[in-house]
């Protein structure tokens, strides 16, 4: 059973930055395509960004394009979500999820739990002055 763990959330002022991290335990993160999702209070969960297992394919939601960047450091066994120019509308719980089976050459921003089989517990991001 894979364990997916997010970290790096917190409270930040508008215009600030945060970097979220996602680690997949019991395996190496380089095997898995990873997606970042978020859920704000009273709203549905939505896709933010994703990256294939090789890193050659990425996708970013229109709402965060130009502000958020996804990357992976296989040596550190971690996928990152760099979030810049944060806005109050970015306030949400951010989740990391791994696609099954391993070595997916693409990913999706759809909340497809048939593909994203392993989810973390989430990390809270609050953007407020």
Image (cartoon, rainbow, N blue to C red):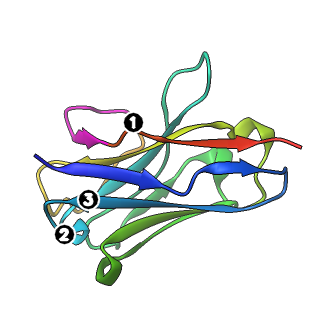
Q: Is residue 79 left or right of residue 60?
A: left
In the picture, the quarter occupied by the C terminus is top right
Residue 115 is covered by the magenta coloring? yes
Which is nearer the N-term, disc 1 or disc 3?
Answer: 3
Q: What span is in magenta?
A: 111-119
Dot 3 surroundings within 10 Å: few (below 14), some, or many (20 or more)? many
Question: Is residue 82 positioned above or below 54 on the image?
Answer: above
Q: In terms of depth relative to the viewer, which is nearer, 115 or 117? A: 117
Q: Name the quadrant containing residue 105.
A: bottom left
Residue 46 is covered by the magenta coloring? no
Instruction: Identify residue for label 2.
Output: 28
Q: Residue at x 16, y 50 (%)?
A: 2
Give the image location of residue 17, x and y in percent.
72, 62
Q: Name the quadrant containing residue 73.
A: bottom left
Q: Which labelled disc corresponds to residue 24?
A: 3
Instruction: Identify residue for label 1.
Output: 110
């Amino acid at each position: 059973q894979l364990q997916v763990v997010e970290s790096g959330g917190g409270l930040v002022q508008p215009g600030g930055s945060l970097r979220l991290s996602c680690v997949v335990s019991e395996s190496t993160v380089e095997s898995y395509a990873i997606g970042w999702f978020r859920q704000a209070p009273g709203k549905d969960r939505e896709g933010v960004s994703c990256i294939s297992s090789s890193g050659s394919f990425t996708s970013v939601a229109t709402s965060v394009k130009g502000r958020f960047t996804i990357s992976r450091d296989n040596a550190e066994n971690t996928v990152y979500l760099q979030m810049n120019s944060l806005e109050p509308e970015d306030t949400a719980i951010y989740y990391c999820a791994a696609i099954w089976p391993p070595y997916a050459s693409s990913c999706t921003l759809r909340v497809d739990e048939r593909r994203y089989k392993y989810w973390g517990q989430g990390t809270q991001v609050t953007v407020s002055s």
